[in-house]
Amino acid sequence: MQQRAGITLTESYAMYPTAAVSGWYFSHPDSRYLVVGRIDRDQVEDYARRKGLGVEEVERWLAPNLGYEPEVAELQIA
């Protein structure tokens, strides 16, 4: 493993570098996968309200999962 992938095990058997991942993966012909839909603005507003955050901040964190284009705040030059 070390020569091919550059991955070593620590004395507690953790993989190093820490970005290395291994596991057992099983599948079944009848398996189904969960698909999460896009997040709508009403959901973002509700989440922001419950978390005490601004909608713009929540949109920034959830941008890859939004089902709409967030409104862009206009810059005002004084």
Image (cartoon, grey):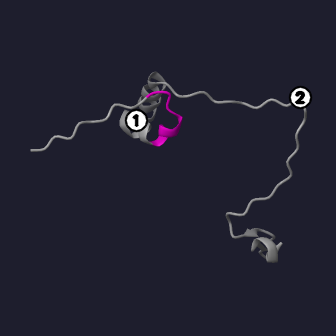
Judging depth in this view, the residue of 53 and 58 nearest the camera is 58
Whole-percent x, y for residue 71 in the image: 34, 31
Location of residue 77 by image quarter: top left
Judging depth in this view, the residue of 16 and 49 nearest the camera is 16
| Residue 36: numbered disc | none
Give the residue number, with chain letter if any, for mark 2: 30
31 lies left or right of 40: right
Whole-percent x, y for residue 28 in the image: 90, 35
Q: Is residue 32 visible?
A: yes
- Furthest residue toward right: 29
Which tag, 2 or 1, sits closer to the chain's start?
A: 2
Whole-percent x, y for residue 32 in the image: 80, 29
Location of residue 75 by image quarter: top left
- Furthest residue toward left: 78
Q: CA distance from mark 2 to mark 1?
A: 42 Å
71 lies left or right of 30: left
Give the residue number, with chain letter if any, for mark 1: 52
| Tag 1: amino acid | Gly
